[in-house]
Protein backbone atom coordinates (compact mmCIF):
# COMPACT_ATOMS: atom_id res chain seq x y z
CA UNK A 1 0.00 0.00 0.00
CA UNK A 2 1.26 3.44 -0.89
CA UNK A 3 0.35 6.31 1.42
CA UNK A 4 0.25 9.96 0.38
CA UNK A 5 -0.32 12.84 2.76
CA UNK A 6 -1.71 15.55 0.50
CA UNK A 7 -1.77 18.14 3.27
CA UNK A 8 1.82 18.15 4.47
CA UNK A 9 3.79 17.19 1.41
CA UNK A 10 4.11 19.30 -1.69
CA UNK A 11 2.66 16.53 -3.83
CA UNK A 12 -1.05 17.20 -4.24
CA UNK A 13 -1.17 16.90 -8.01
CA UNK A 14 1.42 14.17 -8.46
CA UNK A 15 -0.18 11.98 -5.77
CA UNK A 16 -3.60 12.33 -7.38
CA UNK A 17 -2.13 11.53 -10.79
CA UNK A 18 -0.43 8.46 -9.34
CA UNK A 19 -3.67 7.30 -7.70
CA UNK A 20 -5.70 8.05 -10.85
CA UNK A 21 -3.33 5.86 -12.82
CA UNK A 22 -3.71 3.07 -10.25
CA UNK A 23 -7.49 3.28 -10.78
CA UNK A 24 -6.97 3.17 -14.57
CA UNK A 25 -4.88 0.00 -14.40
CA UNK A 26 -7.31 -1.84 -12.12
CA UNK A 27 -6.08 -0.97 -8.63
CA UNK A 28 -7.96 0.06 -5.50
CA UNK A 29 -7.58 3.54 -3.94
CA UNK A 30 -8.86 4.92 -0.64
CA UNK A 31 -9.80 8.59 -0.90
CA UNK A 32 -11.49 11.26 1.22
CA UNK A 33 -15.03 12.43 0.67
CA UNK A 34 -17.18 14.78 2.75
CA UNK A 35 -19.25 11.84 4.09
CA UNK A 36 -16.64 9.16 4.92
CA UNK A 37 -13.48 7.84 3.21
CA UNK A 38 -14.25 5.69 0.16
CA UNK A 39 -12.48 2.66 -1.34
CA UNK A 40 -12.62 3.09 -5.09
CA UNK A 41 -12.08 1.18 -8.31
CA UNK A 42 -12.92 1.64 -12.00
CA UNK A 43 -16.63 0.82 -12.48
CA UNK A 44 -15.89 -0.89 -15.79
CA UNK A 45 -13.20 -3.19 -14.42
CA UNK A 46 -14.93 -6.17 -12.78
CA UNK A 47 -11.69 -7.62 -11.43
CA UNK A 48 -10.88 -4.32 -9.73
CA UNK A 49 -14.40 -4.07 -8.31
CA UNK A 50 -14.09 -7.60 -6.94
CA UNK A 51 -10.88 -6.54 -5.15
CA UNK A 52 -12.97 -4.04 -3.16
CA UNK A 53 -15.35 -6.77 -2.01
CA UNK A 54 -12.43 -9.07 -1.13
CA UNK A 55 -10.50 -6.37 0.75
CA UNK A 56 -13.54 -5.31 2.78
CA UNK A 57 -14.93 -8.78 3.33
CA UNK A 58 -18.14 -7.37 1.86
CA UNK A 59 -21.05 -9.62 0.89
CA UNK A 60 -21.37 -9.86 -2.89
CA UNK A 61 -25.07 -8.92 -2.72
CA UNK A 62 -24.33 -5.46 -1.26
CA UNK A 63 -24.00 -3.00 -4.18
CA UNK A 64 -21.52 -0.12 -4.45
CA UNK A 65 -22.22 3.54 -5.06
CA UNK A 66 -20.86 4.96 -8.34
CA UNK A 67 -19.05 8.28 -7.86
CA UNK A 68 -18.96 10.97 -10.55
CA UNK A 69 -17.34 14.40 -10.88
CA UNK A 70 -19.76 15.93 -13.42
CA UNK A 71 -23.49 16.19 -12.75
CA UNK A 72 -24.33 15.40 -16.34
CA UNK A 73 -22.73 11.96 -16.07
CA UNK A 74 -25.94 10.84 -14.39
CA UNK A 75 -27.36 10.56 -17.93
CA UNK A 76 -24.51 8.25 -18.98
CA UNK A 77 -25.06 5.90 -16.05
CA UNK A 78 -28.85 5.84 -15.65
CA UNK A 79 -32.00 5.81 -17.76
CA UNK A 80 -35.61 7.02 -17.28
CA UNK A 81 -34.51 9.73 -14.85
CA UNK A 82 -37.48 11.67 -13.44
CA UNK A 83 -37.38 15.51 -13.54
CA UNK A 84 -37.56 15.76 -9.76
CA UNK A 85 -34.28 13.82 -9.53
CA UNK A 86 -32.59 16.47 -11.68
CA UNK A 87 -34.09 19.12 -9.37
CA UNK A 88 -32.35 17.37 -6.47
CA UNK A 89 -29.01 17.01 -8.23
CA UNK A 90 -29.14 20.73 -9.11
CA UNK A 91 -29.63 21.54 -5.47
CA UNK A 92 -27.59 18.91 -3.59
CA UNK A 93 -24.76 17.80 -5.92
CA UNK A 94 -21.94 17.82 -5.19
CA UNK A 95 -23.03 16.58 -1.79
CA UNK A 96 -24.09 13.77 0.53
CA UNK A 97 -26.95 12.40 -1.59
CA UNK A 98 -26.83 9.04 -3.45
CA UNK A 99 -29.63 8.34 -5.91
CA UNK A 100 -30.73 4.86 -6.98
CA UNK A 101 -31.86 4.81 -10.62
CA UNK A 102 -32.41 2.34 -13.46
CA UNK A 103 -28.92 1.42 -14.63
CA UNK A 104 -27.54 1.63 -18.15
CA UNK A 105 -26.69 -1.81 -19.50
CA UNK A 106 -22.91 -1.33 -19.59
CA UNK A 107 -22.59 -1.12 -15.79
CA UNK A 108 -21.24 -4.49 -14.63
CA UNK A 109 -23.38 -6.48 -12.26
CA UNK A 110 -20.40 -6.78 -9.88
CA UNK A 111 -20.97 -3.08 -9.06
CA UNK A 112 -24.73 -3.30 -8.62
CA UNK A 113 -24.70 -6.77 -7.01
CA UNK A 114 -26.85 -8.08 -9.83
CA UNK A 115 -29.52 -5.39 -9.46
CA UNK A 116 -30.99 -3.54 -12.44
CA UNK A 117 -30.45 -0.28 -10.54
CA UNK A 118 -27.38 1.78 -9.74
CA UNK A 119 -26.71 4.25 -6.90
CA UNK A 120 -24.96 7.44 -8.08
CA UNK A 121 -23.33 10.26 -6.12
CA UNK A 122 -21.19 13.30 -6.83
CA UNK A 123 -18.95 13.83 -3.78
CA UNK A 124 -18.10 17.30 -2.50
CA UNK A 125 -14.37 16.93 -1.92
CA UNK A 126 -11.58 18.31 -4.05
CA UNK A 127 -9.45 15.14 -3.82
CA UNK A 128 -12.37 12.87 -4.68
CA UNK A 129 -13.42 14.94 -7.68
CA UNK A 130 -9.84 15.39 -8.96
CA UNK A 131 -9.25 11.64 -8.63
CA UNK A 132 -12.39 10.87 -10.63
CA UNK A 133 -11.55 13.46 -13.31
CA UNK A 134 -7.88 12.51 -13.66
CA UNK A 135 -8.67 8.78 -13.84
CA UNK A 136 -11.22 9.36 -16.57
CA UNK A 137 -13.32 6.63 -14.91
CA UNK A 138 -16.49 6.43 -12.92
CA UNK A 139 -15.40 5.20 -9.52
CA UNK A 140 -17.34 2.51 -7.67
CA UNK A 141 -16.75 2.97 -3.96
CA UNK A 142 -18.19 1.80 -0.66
CA UNK A 143 -16.83 3.11 2.63
CA UNK A 144 -13.13 2.29 3.16
CA UNK A 145 -13.53 0.11 6.24
CA UNK A 146 -13.59 -3.64 6.81
CA UNK A 147 -17.23 -4.74 6.70
CA UNK A 148 -18.74 -4.52 10.15
CA UNK A 149 -16.25 -1.90 11.41
CA UNK A 150 -17.21 1.74 11.97
CA UNK A 151 -16.87 3.79 8.78
CA UNK A 152 -13.62 5.75 8.33
CA UNK A 153 -13.68 9.51 8.71
CA UNK A 154 -9.88 9.92 8.61
CA UNK A 155 -7.11 8.25 6.60
CA UNK A 156 -5.77 6.86 9.89
CA UNK A 157 -8.97 4.78 10.19
CA UNK A 158 -8.39 3.35 6.70
CA UNK A 159 -4.79 2.47 7.63
CA UNK A 160 -6.01 0.72 10.77
CA UNK A 161 -8.30 -1.58 8.72
CA UNK A 162 -6.17 -2.29 5.62
CA UNK A 163 -2.60 -3.14 4.73
CA UNK A 164 -1.60 -4.51 1.32
CA UNK A 165 -5.13 -5.50 0.25
CA UNK A 166 -5.43 -1.97 -1.14
CA UNK A 167 -3.01 -0.09 -3.38
CA UNK A 168 -3.15 3.59 -2.36
CA UNK A 169 -4.41 5.78 0.50
CA UNK A 170 -4.90 9.47 -0.21
CA UNK A 171 -4.83 11.29 3.13
CA UNK A 172 -6.33 14.76 2.93
CA UNK A 173 -8.97 16.27 5.19
CA UNK A 174 -11.07 14.51 7.80
CA UNK A 175 -14.57 13.88 6.46
CA UNK A 176 -16.52 17.11 7.01
CA UNK A 177 -19.84 15.37 7.71
CA UNK A 178 -18.65 12.06 9.14
CA UNK A 179 -21.68 9.89 8.27
CA UNK A 180 -22.45 8.08 5.01
CA UNK A 181 -24.59 9.72 2.35
CA UNK A 182 -28.36 9.79 2.30
CA UNK A 183 -29.48 7.09 -0.16
CA UNK A 184 -32.79 7.62 -1.96
CA UNK A 185 -34.70 5.57 -4.48
CA UNK A 186 -35.15 7.90 -7.46
CA UNK A 187 -37.23 5.62 -9.66
CA UNK A 188 -40.71 6.64 -8.55
CA UNK A 189 -42.71 9.84 -8.32
CA UNK A 190 -40.96 11.11 -5.17
CA UNK A 191 -37.87 10.33 -3.07
CA UNK A 192 -37.94 7.25 -0.86
CA UNK A 193 -35.14 7.36 1.69
CA UNK A 194 -33.28 4.04 1.90
CA UNK A 195 -30.62 5.33 4.29
CA UNK A 196 -30.79 8.60 6.23
CA UNK A 197 -27.88 11.05 5.99
CA UNK A 198 -27.06 14.75 5.95
CA UNK A 199 -29.69 15.45 3.28
CA UNK A 200 -32.74 15.07 5.50
CA UNK A 201 -36.37 14.21 4.76
CA UNK A 202 -37.28 17.87 5.45
CA UNK A 203 -34.81 19.01 2.79
CA UNK A 204 -36.19 16.48 0.28
CA UNK A 205 -39.77 17.54 0.98
CA UNK A 206 -38.82 21.18 0.55
CA UNK A 207 -37.40 20.47 -2.93
CA UNK A 208 -39.76 17.73 -4.14
CA UNK A 209 -42.99 18.45 -2.25
CA UNK A 210 -43.13 14.93 -0.80
CA UNK A 211 -40.77 12.21 0.45
CA UNK A 212 -40.96 8.97 2.43
CA UNK A 213 -38.60 6.93 4.59
CA UNK A 214 -38.23 3.20 4.00
CA UNK A 215 -35.24 2.30 6.16
CA UNK A 216 -37.08 1.48 9.37
CA UNK A 217 -39.62 -0.74 7.67
CA UNK A 218 -37.12 -2.62 5.58
CA UNK A 219 -35.14 -3.84 8.59
CA UNK A 220 -37.77 -6.55 8.94
CA UNK A 221 -38.54 -7.55 5.40
CA UNK A 222 -36.70 -10.39 3.69
CA UNK A 223 -35.84 -8.47 0.54
CA UNK A 224 -34.84 -4.98 1.63
CA UNK A 225 -34.98 -2.14 -0.89
CA UNK A 226 -31.34 -1.42 -0.17
CA UNK A 227 -29.36 -4.62 0.39
CA UNK A 228 -26.83 -2.95 2.68
CA UNK A 229 -29.53 -2.36 5.27
CA UNK A 230 -29.87 -5.98 6.26
CA UNK A 231 -26.28 -6.20 7.52
CA UNK A 232 -25.31 -5.28 11.06
CA UNK A 233 -23.13 -2.31 10.31
CA UNK A 234 -21.12 -0.04 12.47
CA UNK A 235 -20.29 -2.42 15.26
CA UNK A 236 -17.39 -1.58 17.52
CA UNK A 237 -15.87 -4.35 19.65
CA UNK A 238 -17.32 -2.85 22.83
CA UNK A 239 -20.96 -3.19 23.79
CA UNK A 240 -22.83 0.04 22.99
CA UNK A 241 -25.74 1.26 25.12
CA UNK A 242 -27.97 4.25 24.42
CA UNK A 243 -29.10 6.44 27.29
CA UNK A 244 -31.96 8.94 27.15
CA UNK A 245 -34.14 11.04 29.38
CA UNK A 246 -33.65 13.86 31.83
CA UNK A 247 -29.98 14.74 32.36
CA UNK A 248 -29.72 14.03 36.09
CA UNK A 249 -31.57 10.71 35.70
CA UNK A 250 -29.25 9.68 32.87
CA UNK A 251 -26.24 10.67 35.03
CA UNK A 252 -27.58 8.57 37.91
CA UNK A 253 -27.94 5.47 35.69
CA UNK A 254 -24.45 5.97 34.25
CA UNK A 255 -22.89 6.46 37.71
CA UNK A 256 -24.61 3.30 38.96
CA UNK A 257 -23.07 1.34 36.11
CA UNK A 258 -19.68 2.99 36.69
CA UNK A 259 -19.71 1.78 40.29
CA UNK A 260 -19.89 -1.80 38.97
CA UNK A 261 -17.64 -1.41 35.94
CA UNK A 262 -14.88 1.21 35.66
CA UNK A 263 -14.07 0.16 32.08
CA UNK A 264 -16.84 2.17 30.50
CA UNK A 265 -16.75 5.26 28.26
CA UNK A 266 -19.20 8.00 27.41
CA UNK A 267 -20.06 9.82 24.17
CA UNK A 268 -22.33 12.67 25.20
CA UNK A 269 -23.03 16.39 25.52
CA UNK A 270 -20.90 18.37 28.01
CA UNK A 271 -24.00 18.87 30.11
CA UNK A 272 -24.35 15.13 30.77
CA UNK A 273 -20.62 14.37 30.96
CA UNK A 274 -20.13 16.96 33.73
CA UNK A 275 -22.64 15.14 35.93
CA UNK A 276 -21.03 11.69 35.65
CA UNK A 277 -17.95 10.14 37.20
CA UNK A 278 -16.90 8.40 33.98
CA UNK A 279 -13.26 9.17 33.10
CA UNK A 280 -13.13 8.22 29.41
CA UNK A 281 -15.36 10.79 27.79
CA UNK A 282 -15.75 12.31 24.32
CA UNK A 283 -18.10 15.28 24.15
CA UNK A 284 -19.43 17.44 21.35
CA UNK A 285 -20.96 20.88 20.86
CA UNK A 286 -24.16 20.29 18.95
CA UNK A 287 -25.43 17.68 16.57
CA UNK A 288 -23.14 18.33 13.60
CA UNK A 289 -20.02 17.90 15.69
CA UNK A 290 -21.54 14.73 17.16
CA UNK A 291 -22.05 13.29 13.65
CA UNK A 292 -18.49 14.25 12.82
CA UNK A 293 -16.97 12.58 15.90
CA UNK A 294 -19.22 9.51 16.17
CA UNK A 295 -17.25 6.87 14.24
CA UNK A 296 -13.93 8.25 15.48
CA UNK A 297 -15.17 7.96 19.06
CA UNK A 298 -16.23 4.33 18.57
CA UNK A 299 -12.81 3.52 17.13
CA UNK A 300 -10.90 5.40 19.87
CA UNK A 301 -12.80 3.63 22.62
CA UNK A 302 -12.16 0.26 20.96
CA UNK A 303 -8.42 0.99 20.89
CA UNK A 304 -8.63 1.55 24.64
CA UNK A 305 -10.37 -1.82 25.08
CA UNK A 306 -13.40 -0.21 26.68
CA UNK A 307 -16.09 -2.79 27.57
CA UNK A 308 -19.18 -0.61 27.37
CA UNK A 309 -19.66 2.62 25.40
CA UNK A 310 -22.62 4.68 26.54
CA UNK A 311 -24.01 7.12 23.97
CA UNK A 312 -26.54 9.83 24.71
CA UNK A 313 -29.61 9.68 22.46
CA UNK A 314 -30.05 12.42 19.83
CA UNK A 315 -33.21 14.22 18.79
CA UNK A 316 -34.54 12.62 15.62
CA UNK A 317 -34.19 15.81 13.61
CA UNK A 318 -31.63 17.25 11.20
CA UNK A 319 -28.63 14.92 11.10
CA UNK A 320 -29.78 13.44 14.43
CA UNK A 321 -32.00 11.05 12.45
CA UNK A 322 -28.93 9.68 10.64
CA UNK A 323 -26.82 9.44 13.81
CA UNK A 324 -29.61 7.56 15.60
CA UNK A 325 -29.90 5.16 12.63
CA UNK A 326 -26.17 4.28 13.02
CA UNK A 327 -26.21 4.41 16.80
CA UNK A 328 -29.15 2.00 17.06
CA UNK A 329 -27.31 -0.46 14.80
CA UNK A 330 -24.09 -0.12 16.80
CA UNK A 331 -26.06 -0.69 20.00
CA UNK A 332 -28.22 -3.47 18.59
CA UNK A 333 -31.06 -1.22 19.89
CA UNK A 334 -29.96 -1.75 23.51
CA UNK A 335 -30.62 0.97 26.08
CA UNK A 336 -29.15 1.61 29.51
P1 LIG B 1 -21.52 2.06 1.60
O1 LIG B 1 -20.89 2.72 0.43
O2 LIG B 1 -20.63 1.11 2.34
O3 LIG B 1 -22.12 3.06 2.52
O4 LIG B 1 -22.69 1.18 1.02
C1 LIG B 1 -23.51 1.65 -0.02
C2 LIG B 1 -24.94 1.64 0.36
O5 LIG B 1 -25.73 1.99 -0.79
C3 LIG B 1 -25.42 0.28 0.81
O6 LIG B 1 -26.29 0.43 1.90
C4 LIG B 1 -26.12 -0.26 -0.41
O7 LIG B 1 -27.11 -1.21 -0.10
C5 LIG B 1 -26.72 1.01 -1.04
N1 LIG B 1 -26.89 0.83 -2.48
C6 LIG B 1 -25.93 0.85 -3.41
N2 LIG B 1 -26.44 0.59 -4.63
C7 LIG B 1 -27.76 0.38 -4.45
C8 LIG B 1 -28.85 0.03 -5.33
N3 LIG B 1 -28.65 -0.16 -6.63
N4 LIG B 1 -30.08 -0.11 -4.80
C9 LIG B 1 -30.27 0.08 -3.48
N5 LIG B 1 -29.30 0.39 -2.60
C10 LIG B 1 -28.05 0.54 -3.08
MG1 LIG C 1 -20.14 1.09 4.46
Image: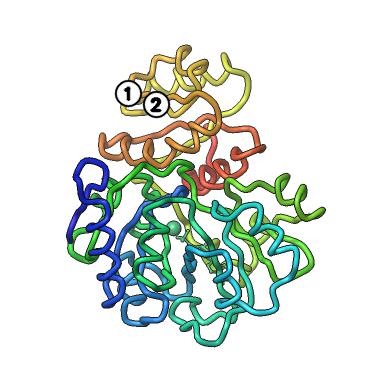
Q: Name the N-terminal-most of marks 1 and 2.
A: 1
Tell me residue 127's x, y (percent). Answer: 36, 53
Q: Which residue is rendered at x = 21% and y = 41% of the image?
A: 8
Q: Quadrant of ligand 2?
A: bottom left
In this rendered view, identify the residue nearer to me: 210 or 221.
Answer: 210
Q: Which residue is at the front of the view, 113 or 155?
A: 155
Q: Give the total of numbered labels.
A: 2
Residue at (37% x, 52% y) in the render: 32
> Is residue 34 positioned above or below 76 on the image?
above
User: Looking at the image, is 32 positioned above or below residue 80?
Assistant: above
Q: Which residue is under mark 1? A: 262
Percent coordinates x, y for residue 111 in the rendering: 45, 76
Measuring from the top left, give residue 211's x and y in whole percent: 76, 55
Say which quarter of the image contains residue 319: top right
To which quarter of the image does residue 117 belong?
A: bottom right
Reply above or below: 233 against 62. Answer: above
Dot label at residue 20:
none
Quarter-of-image position of residue 98: bottom right
- 103 shown above or below 253: below
67 left or right of 54 in image: right
Q: Which mark is residue 282?
A: 2
- Which of the image's four quarters has the N terminus? bottom left
Q: CA distance from mark 1 to mark 2?
A: 16 Å
Q: Nearer the viewer, mark 1 or mark 2?
A: 2
Amino acid sequence: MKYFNLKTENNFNSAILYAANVIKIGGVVAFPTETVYGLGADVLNEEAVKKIFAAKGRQADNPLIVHIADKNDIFKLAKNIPDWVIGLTDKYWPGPLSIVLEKQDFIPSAVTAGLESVAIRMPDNIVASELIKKSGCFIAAPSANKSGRPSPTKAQHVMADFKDEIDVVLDYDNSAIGLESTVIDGRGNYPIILRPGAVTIEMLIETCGYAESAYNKSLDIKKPLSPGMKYTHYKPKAEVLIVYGETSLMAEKINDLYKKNKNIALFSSDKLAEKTKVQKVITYQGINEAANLFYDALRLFDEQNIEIIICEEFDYKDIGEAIMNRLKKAAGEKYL
